[in-house]
C-alpha cells in the first residue's frame, strides 16, 4: 500500500476489505456503481462488501447501486441482482452508459476500482474533499439518468430470452431477412431486437455487440 495526497493505493482486495470494513459498519449512506455483480465481491470473503449483513440490519442506512445494463442479459445475474435488492433493501438502477466502478461512503470517502494485473486488482481510496465531491457529482448524474431495476428488467425480458439466438445469428453474419425467419419474427421486429440488444450491451455496432457479448460470456 502507498499513500499520496489523501489517496491510498491498495493492491490487494483482502487488505482493502480489512481497511474499510469499519467504515461500512458506521456509514449512513453507501453509493455503488459496478459493471458486473462481482467487482465488489471479494474472493477472500463470502459476501459483497456493500451488502454486509451486520450493516444491512441497520435501518438508518441508505444503499444505492447502479449496474451496467448488460448484467441483466444473463438470467442468473438478473435473478441474483433482484435477490440482493430485496434482501438488503437497496435501491438499484440500471444504466446503458459506461460506469466508473466506484463506492462512495457518506459523501466523504471514495473507493475506485482499478485494473487487474496478475490476478490482483488495485483500488484507490480517496479522502480529499474536492476529489470526493467530483466523483459524487458524477455518480448523482448517472443515478438520475439510470432506470429503476424493475422497470428495466421488464423492458429487457424479451431480448434477454432471444439474446443467445440473436448473437449466434449475428456471429454467423446471417442477413436480417433470414435471421428474422429463423426466429419467427418480422424483419422490423428483428432489427428492433438487435437495436435493443446493442443498447443493453453499450455497443455502437453489431461487431462491438458481439465482442462485448464474448467478454460477458454470453456467447
Image (cartoon, rainbow, N blue to C red):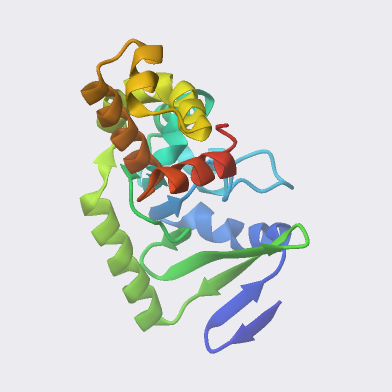
Relative image position of residue 167 (x, y in whole percent): 47, 30
Q: Quadrant of residue 158?
A: top left
In the shown orientation, is residue 39 left or right of residue 166? right
Quadrant the C terminus occupies:
top right
Residue 19 visible somewhere in the drawing: no
| Residue 199, horizontal then vertical, whole percent | 32, 42
Residue 43 place in picture, x, y as percent: 71, 46
- At x 62%, y 40%, the residue is 47
Q: In this view, does 159 lie above or below 66?
A: above
The number of callouts visible is 0
Of 151 and 12, the residue lying toward us: 151
* Residue 195: quarter of image: top left
Q: Tell whether 51 sits left or right of 19.
A: left
Q: Is residue 180 left or right of residue 169?
A: left
Provide residue 24's location: percent of width, then percent of height.
51, 55
Q: Quadrant of the N terminus?
A: bottom right
Query: Is 67 located above or below residue 110 in the figure?
Result: above
Question: Is 106 positioned to the left or the right of 144 in the image?
Answer: right
- In the image, what residue occupies the spot 68% across and 82% down? 2
Residue at left 26%, top 22%?
A: 187
Q: Observer-nearest residue: 39 or 171? A: 171
Evaluate whether residue 70 shows in this view.
yes
Amino acid at each position: 500500500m502507498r499513500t499520496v495526497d489523501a489517496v491510498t493505493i491498495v493492491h490487494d482486495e483482502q487488505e482493502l476489505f480489512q481497511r474499510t470494513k469499519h467504515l461500512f459498519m458506521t456509514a449512513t449512506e453507501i453509493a455503488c456503481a459496478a459493471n458486473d455483480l462481482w467487482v465488489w465481491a471479494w474472493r477472500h470473503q463470502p459476501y459483497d462488501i456493500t451488502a454486509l449483513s451486520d450493516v444491512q440490519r441497520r435501518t438508518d442506512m441508505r444503499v444505492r447501486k447502479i449496474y451496467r445494463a448488460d448484467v441483466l442479459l444473463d438470467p442468473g445475474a438478473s435473478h441474483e441482482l433482484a435477490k440482493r435488492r430485496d434482501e438488503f433493501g437497496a435501491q438499484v438502477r440500471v444504466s446503458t452508459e459506461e460506469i466508473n466502478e466506484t463506492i462512495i461512503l457518506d459523501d466523504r470517502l471514495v473507493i475506485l476500482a482499478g485494473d487487474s494485473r496478475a490476478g490482483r486488482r488495485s483500488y484507490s481510496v480517496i479522502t480529499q474533499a474536492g476529489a470526493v465531491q467530483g466523483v459524487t457529482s458524477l455518480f448523482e448524474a448517472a443515478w438520475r439518468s439510470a432506470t429503476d431495476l424493475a422497470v428495466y428488467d421488464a423492458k429487457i425480458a424479451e431480448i434477454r430470452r432471444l439474446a443467445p439466438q440473436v448473437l449466434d445469428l449475428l456471429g454467423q453474419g446471417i442477413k436480417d431477412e433470414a435471421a428474422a425467419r429463423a426466429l419467427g419474427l418480422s424483419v422490423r421486429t428483428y432489427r428492433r431486437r438487435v437495436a435493443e440488444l446493442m443498447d443493453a450491451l453499450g455497443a455502437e455496432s453489431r461487431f462491438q455487440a458481439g465482442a462485448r457479448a464474448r467478454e460477458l460470456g454470453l456467447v
